[in-house]
Amino acid sequence: MNRIYVDHAATTPVSEKAFAAMLPYFRESFGNPSALHSYGQEAKKAIESGRRAVARAIGAASSEIYFTSGGTESDNWAIHSACEMKRDRGRHIIGTAIEHNAVLRTLEKLQQRGYTVTLLRPDARGRVTADRLEAAIRADTVLISVMLANNVVGTVLPIEALCGVAHRHGILFHTDAVQAVGHIPVDVRKLGVDLLSLSAHKFHGPKGAGALFSKLPRLPLPYITGGGQEKGGRSGTENVAGIVGMAAALTECVDGLSERMRYLAGLRDRLIERTLQIPGAYLTGDPVERLPGHASFLFDGIGHSARLIAMLNEAGICASAGAACSASATEASHVLESLGYDAARNQSALRISLSTCNTEAEIDAISDRLPLFIAQLRRK
Ligand code: PLP
């Protein structure tokens, strides 16, 4: 059976270009980048070239890019560093209720250490306004962390405006851009952010590679201590192949971005239009300000969508309920809950996230089956 993969918000296949770029760094150019001989220097050169490519893709300087193991680590590092840097100013942090657990759990940990955390509730479409943010700011606020695009409902948040508010009050701003980088234009200067997290496996790079953009004069927290790699901030022998693959994948995404966005939005809108013809089907997230390849729905009367996901899977269609990137993919989504959906609706979520690997024929195959499966579940 030919399978249809539509869970790209969870992870993506490594692109051919990224895979080919990585291969030499497993066997031929396998050196430790810290070594002084030619093997080491080849690896070091590859890392620095990767750093330049990642920086270019998001409008940063290469000195502002720090390599990590992925989005989770970047989020942790950014938040802890910002708090440490502003320790003397206060102990209040603002986030949103729809952040990924990589941010929420980090904020919880800081709460246990005496910080106060305000989580802004977004509107029903997943947006947070500058006014709401302004109202939550206190004299002791040290950091605001708001994601650029939401993984569960696909809403793109107005980071430029929110960051402007933060800076008017002299507060640092971090954005988790894991779902956005490689999918929509991301320019750190235009956004104005101080810190930004990204992850390679969300844009056809390998798992276990990510980056943190930081324009702070230095990252005050040696996040992982040891041999002093990444300017002493994140020790450990670098994931050379991962970095090379991430840089190649990101360059590929950014180079063809407007064309990819147009293609994906076309597939997404075709899917949304067909799905909303099913009675009792609802689109979640913002209908306009959303990721080009992201469609998320709720269905009346189907119970838990785990059964729908299983039926789709039987038919060779690999979709998800929402955040598949946490260990427990079946737990009720805190995102849908904070958008105001009750528990019954919340559990009926279906997320279909696309890439340029998907075709119109695949969208039609999904659209043909969905009404049948929904009807079947409602009969049960
Ligand atoms: N932030 C968001 C918005 C995500 O969707 C994910 C997905 O897993 C992460 C952070 C974590 O990234 P990683 O899997 O690279 O640790």
Image (cartoon, rainbow, N blue to C red):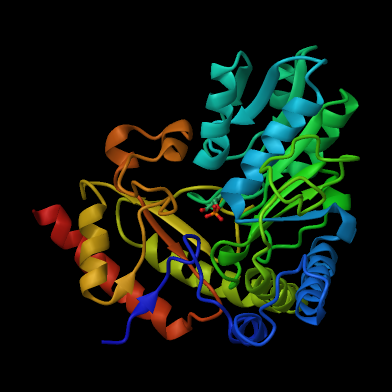
Residue 255, picture quadrant: bottom right
Residue 79, picture quadrant: top right
Is 33 or 50 nearer to us in this picture? Answer: 33
Q: Is residue 243 above or below residue 147?
A: below
Q: Name which residue lies at 75% across and 43% down.
A: 159
Task: From the viewer's perspective, tell me whether residue 44 is left or right of residue 100.
Answer: right
Q: Is residue 129 visible?
A: no
Task: From the viewer's perspective, tell me whether residue 196 is left or right of residue 45.
Answer: left
Report the quarter where the N terminus lies: bottom left
Is 241 or 289 nearer to us in this picture? Answer: 241
Residue 238 position in % (x across, y down): 68, 63
Q: For the view shown, which residue lies furthest in the left direction?
A: 380
Q: Name which residue lies at 70% across and 43% down.
A: 175
Q: Is residue 62 above or below residue 331?
A: below
Q: Is residue 197 visible?
A: yes
Is 89 or 266 nearer to us in this picture? Answer: 89
Q: Is residue 106 above or below residue 285?
A: above
Q: Is residue 228 above or below residue 174?
A: below
Q: Name which residue lies at 87% across and 40% down.
A: 216
Residue 3 position in % (x across, y down): 33, 81
What is the total number of numbered labels drawn onto the structure image?
0
Residue 222 position in % (x across, y down): 74, 39
Residue 348 position in % (x across, y down): 30, 48
Is 72 or 322 nearer to us in this picture? Answer: 72
Task: From the viewer's perspective, tell me whether residue 287 is left or right of residue 223.
Answer: left
